[in-house]
Image (cartoon, rainbow, N blue to C red):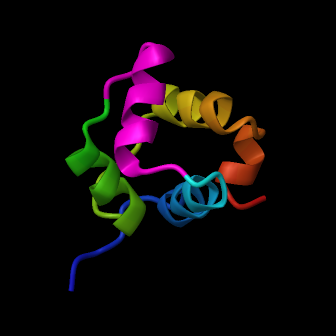
């Protein structure tokens, strides 16, 4: 069993599914915000095995239209 290295992955997956987006859609949307995260890396983020940089968290929040606090589970 792998150790979780982020706390936002489950929230990112939940927001992605609520907005009916595929991982590829999110990857492309992040690229439009100046951040490259491949579909494979996004999958690792969602299961918690890839760390998420601060600038990536801000890009996810902008993409999903939510405050950073929501991604962090606040």
Q: Residue at x 43, y 51 (%)?
A: 22
Q: Is residue 6 magenta?
A: no
Seen from this angle, which residue lies furthest bottom?
A: 1
Q: Is residue 11 left or right of residue 29?
A: right
Depth check, front residue: 16 or 66: 16
Residue in the picture at 66% in, 60% down: 18
Q: Which residues are magenta?
A: 21-36
Compared to residue 32, the image places residue 58 above or below, namely: below
Looking at the image, residue 28 lies above or below residue 44: above
**Front residue (pair 39, 61):** 39
Residue 68 falls in image quadrant: top right
Q: Main secondary structure of the magenta part?
A: helix
Q: Is 33 left or right of 4, judged from the image as shown?
A: right
Residue 73: x and y in percent read 70, 61
Q: Quadrant of the C terminus?
A: bottom right
The single residue placed furthest to the front in the displayed view is 20
Q: Nearer the viewer, residue 64 or 21?
A: 21
Q: Quadrant of residue 8?
A: bottom right
Q: Quadrant of the N terminus?
A: bottom left
Q: Residue 38 location in percent, x, y?
A: 25, 37
- Which residue shows up at 56% across the image and 36% down it? 60
How many numbered marks appear?
0
């Amino acid at each position: 069993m792998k150790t979780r290295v982020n706390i936002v992955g489950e929230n990112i997956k939940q927001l992605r599914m609520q907005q009916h987006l595929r991982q590829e859609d999110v990857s492309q949307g992040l690229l439009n915000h100046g951040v490259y995260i491949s579909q494979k890396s996004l999958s690792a983020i969602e299961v918690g095995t890839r760390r998420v940089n601060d600038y990536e968290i801000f890009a996810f929040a902008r993409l999903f239209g939510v405050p950073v606090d929501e991604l962090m589970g606040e």
